[in-house]
């Protein structure tokens, strides 16, 4: 399996990018969130998974390994193919998907085009044990439970061009640094997250 690709971005389209690796341009299908992180002429590294079909070899790319993990996990459910799995990650961050599955939040999954109530229930039924418990006090890959300020900061970061996954990682770092007592205002927390993410650009 091609686990990752790294090279110069040659082209960015509506749902595909081309990354030059060793003189070869590889077409990689990505979510809008992932594509938003890429710039033509700049170097990039994408976690990838190769889907093999009788008539095609399709490479899917992700901003990090966690997105790829959720993408592959979703496809273990009957009736969920790569297009639907990619659609899930276009709407929700990996953390949000884990929480929705763990807590049986059907309404969250049905926000994804192509997933109805029965499909969402099947995903939850088949994957709940695989994602494990995500309780109110637990964290998933360093991202703590969502509080009202976290969702506001997340929306602000995504609106500024960062991916949902990047936003969740920054929020997790900001949250872990908060001391006991009143939570700072959202604008202050947003500035902290932007400062953290600024280092990754």
Image (cartoon, helix red, strand yellow):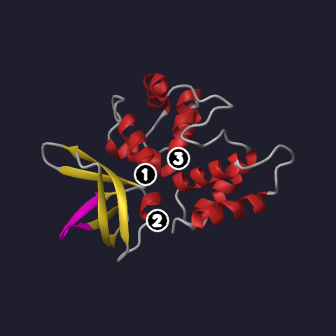
Residue 36 counted in the magenta span: no
Counting residues from the N terminus, which is met first, the one under dot 1 or under dot 3?
1
Name the chief secondary structure element in magenta. strand
Badges 1 and 3: C-beta atoms under 8 Å apart? no
Residue interval drawn in magenta: 20-28
Q: Which residue is drawn at 56% across and 67% down?
A: 199
Q: Which residue is drawn at 64% across and 56% down?
A: 155
Residue 54 x/y as whole percent: 13, 43
According to the picture, the residue beneath numbered tag 3 turns out to be 92
Q: How crowded is mark 2: few (under 14 residues within 10 Å), some or many (20 or more)?
A: some
Along the line of sight, which residue is nearer the eye, 183 or 106?
Answer: 183
According to the picture, the residue beneath numbered tag 1 turns out to be 64
Picture quarter containing residue 137?
Answer: top right
Q: Label 3, secondary structure: give it.
A: loop
Q: Residue furthest right?
A: 182
Residue 38 x/y as whole percent: 41, 68
The answer to whether residue 87 of the structure is visible from this angle is: yes
Specify the quadrant that holds the N terminus: top left
| Mark 1–mark 2 distance (CA, rounded to whole Å) | 14 Å
Q: Residues within 10 Å of mark 1 (few under 14, many from 20)?
A: some
Residue 200 x/y as whole percent: 52, 65
Q: How many labels does the image show?
A: 3
Q: Residues within 10 Å of mark 3 (few under 14, many from 20)?
A: many
Dot in front, 1 or 2: 1
According to the picture, the residue beneath numbered tag 2 turns out to be 36
Along the line of sight, which residue is nearer the eye, 120 or 43?
Answer: 43
Residue 24 counted in the magenta span: yes
Is 176 on the left-hand or right-hand side of 44?
A: right
Picture quarter containing residue 103?
Answer: top right
């Amino acid at each position: 399996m091609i686990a990752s690709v790294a090279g110069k971005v040659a082209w960015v389209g509506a749902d595909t990018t081309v990354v030059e690796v060793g003189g070869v341009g590889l077409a990689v299908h990505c979510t809008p969130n992932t594509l938003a992180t890429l710039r033509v002429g700049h170097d990039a590294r994408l976690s990838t998974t190769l889907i093999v079909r009788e008539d095609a070899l399709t490479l899917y790319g992700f901003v990090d390994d966690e997105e790829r993990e959720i993408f592959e996990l979703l496809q273990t459910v009957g009736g969920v193919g790569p297009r639907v799995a990619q659609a899930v990650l276009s709407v929700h961050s990996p953390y949000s998907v884990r929480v929705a599955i763990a807590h049986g939040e059907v309404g969250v999954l049905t926000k994804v085009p192509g997933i109805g109530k029965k499909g969402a229930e099947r995903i939850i039924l088949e994957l709940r044990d695989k994602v494990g418990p995500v309780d109110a006090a637990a964290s998933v890959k360093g991202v703590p439970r969502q509080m009202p300020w976290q969702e506001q900061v997340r929306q602000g970061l995504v609106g500024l061009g960062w991916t949902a996954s990047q936003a969740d990682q920054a929020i997790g770092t900001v949250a872990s640094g908060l001391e006991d007592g009143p939570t700072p205002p959202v604008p202050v927390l947003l500035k902290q997250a932007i400062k953290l993410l600024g280092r990754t650009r």
